[in-house]
Amino acid sequence: MQPILTVGSVAFDSIKTPFGEVSRVVGGAATYFSIAASFFTDVRMVAVVGDDFVEEQMRVFSGRRIDLTGLQRVPGETFRWKGEYSFNLNSRETIYTHLNVFDQFRPVLPESYRPTPFVFLANIHPALQLQVLDQVSAPQFVAADTMNYWIEGTPAELRQVLERVDALVINDEEARELSGEANLVKAARAIQRMGPKLLIIKRGEYGVLMTGDQGFFAAPAMPLEEVSDPTGAGDTFAGGFMGYLAAAGEITEAVVTRGVIAGSALASFAVEDFGLDRLLRLTPAELRDRFDAFKRLTHFEAL
Ligand code: AMP
């Protein structure tokens, strides 16, 4: 089993969906990622919060395999984001993004983090993703996420990140925007030419499409009666996926495909309630049952 290092946002989120609304709840890409990955392995987090992020908020991390030595608390306000979803939850409008303490953040990795072999550059300014990657002594497998905010705002830095990662995990809309291709297969090929050999395209309620050296692998999303809030589903998927790979300690076709199912199983819980609520209540036994449910969902006897 290998540990994972991650850098990304830790946030106060405000979320509005057709099924309810919450404000100033703990969120952030690195938060969802770390909680998900910690079901499988030890996670080392690099991020920054403001002095408004206190004991009560820190509780989401406690009792989990998450090392917070690299989480800085500085004077100022924590990153804040607000999103609003359409009726079918497939599209989302960002109402605001306030970088706040992330604006001045210069990550310095604790000495104990430097030898971490598995690295996930969660969604944040690509320059910060690069600064973190530069400080890891011998990364074996590096994956990244990003979003339209950075694709549009910092394209040059993002290109540098792509040149240095083994895998990219992004959603379909972002894949189209990044590549300039409407067709997802062509988009995937174009993104692979930018660097990442393994590409996972998240398609919301339609599941994920992975492409790499071995061709395509697809996983559906679990059909669920209760879907309240998709926020963080992508980061949760990435946490389950990378956590599974790091726990296995090797990258084989079988491990990577099972990792896709592990990520999909975790993400299927994340959407059942608002913010982090369902993930925080999740037990390992429930996760195993859903992994099995995925096996039944996707299995068929070929003639
Ligand atoms: P997802 O639903 O997977 O796109 O992730 C939503 C999470 O990403 C929320 O918890 C936000 O706090 C965080 N987030 C939103 N916009 C950004 C951004 N531009 N950079 C970093 N994190 C962000």
Image (cartoon, grey):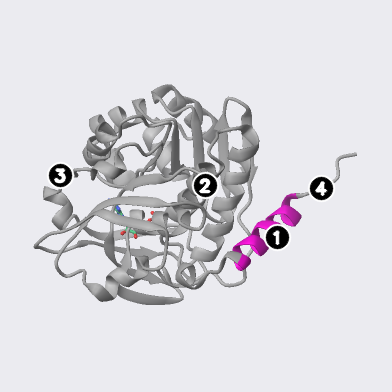
Query: In this view, which residue lies farthest toward the left?
Result: 75
Residue type pointed to by label 3: Arg
10 Å neighbourhood of mark 4: few (<14), some, or many (≥20)? few
Between disc 1 and disc 3, whose residue precedes? 3
* Mark 1: secondary structure: helix
Residue position marked by numbered label 2 in the rendering: 241
Percent of width and height locating residue 177: 38, 38
Residue position marked by numbered label 1 in the rendering: 293
Residue 8 visible in the picture? yes
Between disc 1 and disc 2, whose residue precedes? 2
Query: In this view, which residue lies farthest toward the top?
Result: 193
The residue at 28%/28% (across/down) is 160
Residue position marked by numbered label 4 in the rendering: 300
* Mark 2: secondary structure: helix
Magenta-highlighted residues? 285-298
10 Å neighbourhood of mark 3: few (<14), some, or many (≥20)? few
Between disc 4 and disc 3, whose residue precedes? 3
**The C terminus lies in quadrant:** top right
In this rendering, which labeled residue sits more in front, label 1 or label 3?
Answer: 3
Q: Are marks 1 and 4 in contact (CB under 8 Å)?
A: no
Residue type pointed to by label 4: Phe
Residue type pointed to by label 1: Ala
In three-dimensional space, the C-alpha distance between marks 4 and 2, rounded to whole angstroms, equals 23 Å
Percent of width and height locating residue 115: 34, 36
In three-dimensional space, the C-alpha distance between marks 1 and 2, rounded to whole angstroms, equals 17 Å
In this rendering, which labeled residue sits more in front, label 4 or label 2?
Answer: 2
Please state which of residues 264 and 220 is positioned toward the viewer in this rendering.
264
Residue 88 visible in the picture? no
Q: Are marks 1 and 3 in contact (CB under 8 Å)?
A: no
Between disc 4 and disc 2, whose residue precedes? 2
